[in-house]
Every structure is written in structure tokens, then in C-alpha cells.
DNA sequence: TCCATATTTCGATGATAGTCGAATTATTTA
DNA sequence: TAAATAATTCGACTATCATCGAAATATGGA
């Protein structure tokens, strides 16, 4: 529960080769699941868990749960800086080439995440909606602008009906392949439904991967300037 | 024998509280004897020795032997910087107030060191000779300039005779109270002898301390602009 | 519901490393 | 030359900690 670790604590965190490897991976600023960090540091998942718990305790990293995954990222920016200072004095520590276990490109491109869109497409969709000024992030929530209301309605989505559903209206969801957020919640669900309806996307067999149709590429480009 | 330690090595050095305490003391840039560092870090001399040997091995500190004393100082400036970065993130570690064991003021002012001058007077003498351009330091040696040759001869010192002696002509000696160098070797010896001869200084009883006479203060001021 | 996957907790083990007592070496001082 | 001081090496003890097997928990997908 300690808030700001002292020099010795930080130093001891870095001094362990496994933790140094984990931190080196996390230095990219993105979120990584525990398993991947274990693989990168060349240790068993339990061991990585042990280290991550330790770093979590002193707020060196933060945790975001996402289903059965637990995404870790560097929390304290000052610590990242101190880490960089030390790393600058030496050659890179040995870290396994960081290959994603899931190498399926189609899964990375587009897939369902529960009942909404994920993958490159999911993230680009979120980015585009923000860019156009239809939605914006406020801390951990997503809010819809006046322009957004008009946009969604014109796209054939009845926001008033969506809001009535007994579930979260809209929230962010961390994308495991992109390591960025995409749109989840009821709004995320009706969006993917509408895309299916327009036949912009279609399911692939035996996988959560989703294929983007030619019509889909065209439509997404015209609607939100998304090129994919 | 490793030349540049890596991040983990540096971090592990700092991570130990005793070493952190030692390094904090050494951060003043001066040389400290092993025993004082042990006292400051609140550990037994053997333990300090163990830590210092470790730091010596990776060139974090350097060693200068001086009789039965061994003076350590921070060697690598980049490491001192990294250390500062980490220390800046935290409150100071507990370090015993660093009192010199020898608190005798007269010893600090002027004393014999083997057969030459030490203490404030010894260091000021060295400084003055450098300032006047009579001697200069080159790495670990002291060299005499043309002006210096003239000066010493006019002060009644026969350099040709001094050079003939079967001992080091002149070298630097680390001053334990000032933590800076003073002049040692044959030249250091004839200098103190000449000062005795002129009655600028005189021995005190039962101690290595030396008293500077009024004539001495006057003479040193006139000769080398030394005020003490 | 059942199985697979992701992760953690528990428990045991093995290695490392900081510590200090005792003895040794080196040097100064008397 | 002998005693005192500074520092080290050696050896042993202890505690900490990283590691991993086994089991538990949680969640997803079928």
C-alpha cells in the first residue's frame, strides 16, 4: 500500500534480472498480459505473478482486469525515467523476442470481443469516432457529443432504445492485440450488429475472427474515413 | 575487473541499505577511509570491507592506499548521477552523523605526516605552490616548473641534493582531515625541515600536531600568500 | 454444464548474499 | 622490537528471496 517507494526499493526492483526484463517490456508504455510478460522474462507464470504483485504493491505498475486476462502497465512515470537512466548505462538485458502467442493475423485485424468489435478495426473505429468529435473519453468513461447523437441516429442506431437496455450503455475495453481501447457495452454491441446488418463484416468459421467485406471497407471509409 | 557495470549491477549495489549509506557519504566527492564508512553505515569494518571490495570490482569506487588507511572515493561520475536520480525519488536513508574520530583541532590545522607537513597547512602549501606556478600536478605525479626551480633554490633548498636521495623525490599524499592532497616525498621532507629551521613551525608534545609561530604566519604570507 | 485458458495462491526448495567473530596482514607509534 | 591501529580475508550462520510444482480461482467458449 506504500505510495512512493524509496531509492533502495526501486533499485531492488530493477536489480532482479526477471523484473528488469519485465520492466523493459513495459517501457513501451502499453499494457501487457501477465502471461506474455512471463514469456518475455523467461520465467514461469507463477514467478511473473509474484514479481508483478510485488511491483503492484509499490505502485510501480498498475493492473487492468479484462476477463481472464490481467493487463499490466507502468504506472509511475518518474520510475520509468529512473529506469531509463539506469538502462542507458548498459546494454539491453536479455529479453526473449516478444512474439505474441496468437499469431493469427485475421484475429488481429478484426474479431468479436464478447459482443462487440475488437482488433485493428475495433480500435480504428474508436479512434475515428473520437477524431470526428462524435465521442470523447473522460477518465474511464466514454461520452457522446451532440454531433455524436446525430451521427448515430443517422447511421440507423436508436440511442434511446440502446440506453434502455439493462447493461452498461458504453465503456472502454482494452484490446489485447492493439493494446489500446475500443468501444464496448450496449453501444458497442449495436454497432457491430449494424455492421453485420449492412454486410460490412461477416463471421469466419471456427474462430472469433471477422472478415471485412469490400462493401465494408468502402462504407467505413465513406462514413468515418477509416482505411483498413 | 569488469569496466562498465550494467543496470542490474548498479541497481543491486544501490538496493542494499548499507551500500546506499556508504555511497551517500561518498557522494560528497571526497575520499573516506574504510573505517569511517563502516561507522557511517552502521556496520562492522569487515562488512564495509566486503561491500567496498564489491564496488571496487566494478569500478564504482576507487582506492588510494595511505599507510594503514585505505581511502575510497566515488570513481564513476555517471554512476553518481544515476544514484542521485534514485535518491531524488526518496527521503535520505539513515546515515549516522559523520563525526571524525579525531576531533583534535590542532591536528587538523597542522601536523606531521610521516616526515612532511599535513593538515590545513599542508594542503594550503600545496595549493599555494600550484597557484604561484611553481609546481603542477600531472596525473599522480607532481612536477616542478622552471619558476619552481628558482623559487626553491632561493628559499634555501638545494634541489640537486634532494634529487640525489634514495627515495621518491616528490609525490602527492592524501590528507585525511582535508581529504585533499599535500606534498610528500623528499621535497616534502626538506620543506618541513626548512620551516623548522626558520622557526616558522614547532612540534607540540605528545602529539603529531604542529604549532605555527607568529613568524611562521608572517613568513608564509609573504612567501606564498598563505593566510592561516 | 464442461473443458480450456489465464492467472494467482500456497508451499517447498535451493541459492544467494549480508552479517559478524576470529584470525591475518600491513603499517604506525612508542 | 613490541604494541596498537586499520583494514582485510576466511569461515560460518542466517535470512531473504526467486523459482517452480501443485492446486485453486476465474473466465471464456462450446
Image: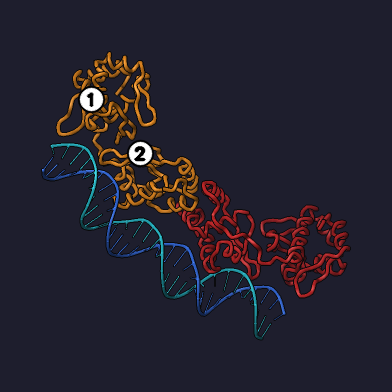
Chain colours: A orange, B red, C blue, D cyan
> B168 above or below B125?
below
Q: Where is residue A8 shown, x and y percent of the image? A: 48, 53
Quarter of the picture containing the C terminus of chain B is bottom right
| Left or right of A15 on screen, residue A180 | left
- Say what secondary structure mark 1 lies in: loop
Residue at screen point 81% across, 71% down: B203
Which residue is disc 2 drawn over?
A31
| Left or right of B94 on screen, residue B181 | right
Residue at screen point 68% across, 63% down: B176
Closer to the camera in the image, A134 or A213: A134
Both labels 1 and 2 in a single chain: yes
- Can residue B60 be seen here? no
Q: Which of the two labelled residues, at mark 1 and mark 2, occupies the earlier sequence position?
A: 2
Q: Quadrant of residue A209?
A: top left
Q: Crowding at label 1, few (<14), some or many (≥20) Cα neighbours within 10 Å?
A: few
- Say what secondary structure mark 2 lies in: loop
- Measured Cα–Cα span from mark 1 to mark 2: 31 Å
Q: Mark 2 belongs to which subunit?
A: A
Residue at screen point 47% across, 48% down: A5
Q: Where is residue A66 shown, x and y percent of the image? A: 28, 38
- Can residue B95 be seen here? yes
Q: Where is residue C23 shown, x and y percent of the image? A: 52, 80
Closer to the camera in the image, A139 or A21: A139
Amino acid at each position: 500500500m506504500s505510495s512512493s517507494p524509496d531509492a533502495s526499493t526501486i533499485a531492488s526492483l530493477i536489480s532482479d534480472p526477471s523484473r528488469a526484463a519485465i520492466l523493459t517490456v513495459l517501457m513501451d508504455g502499453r499494457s501487457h498480459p501477465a502471461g506474455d510478460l512471463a514469456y518475455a522474462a523467461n520465467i514461469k507464470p507463477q514467478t511473473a505473478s509474484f514479481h508483478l504483485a510485488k511491483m503492484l504493491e509499490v505502485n510501480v505498475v498498475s493492473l487492468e482486469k479484462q476477463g481472464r486476462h490481467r493487463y499490466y502497465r507502468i504506472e509511475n512515470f518518474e520510475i520509468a525515467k529512473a529506469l531509463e537512466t539506469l538502462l542507458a548505462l548498459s546494454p539491453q538485458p536479455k529479453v526473449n523476442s516478444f512474439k505474441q502467442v496468437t499469431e493469427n493475423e485475421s484475429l488481429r485485424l478484426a474479431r468479436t470481443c464478447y459482443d462487440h468489435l475488437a482488433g485493428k478495426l475495433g480500435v480504428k473505429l474508436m479512434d475515428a469516432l473520437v477524431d470526428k468529435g462524435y465521442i470523447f473519453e473522460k477518465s474511464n468513461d466514454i461520452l457522446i457529443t451532440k454531433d455524436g447523437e446525430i451521427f448515430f441516429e443517422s447511421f440507423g442506431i436508436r440511442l434511446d432504445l440502446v440506453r434502455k437496455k439493462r447493461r452498461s450503455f458504453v465503456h472502454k475495453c482494452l484490446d489485447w492485440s492493439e493494446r489500446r481501447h475500443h468501444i464496448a457495452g450496449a453501444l458497442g454491441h449495436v454497432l457491430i450488429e449494424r455492421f453485420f446488418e449492412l454486410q460490412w463484416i461477416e463471421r469466419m468459421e471456427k474462430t472469433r475472427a471477422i472478415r471485412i467485406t469490400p462493401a465494408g471497407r468502402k462504407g467505413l471509409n465513406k462514413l468515418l474515413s477509416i482505411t483498413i
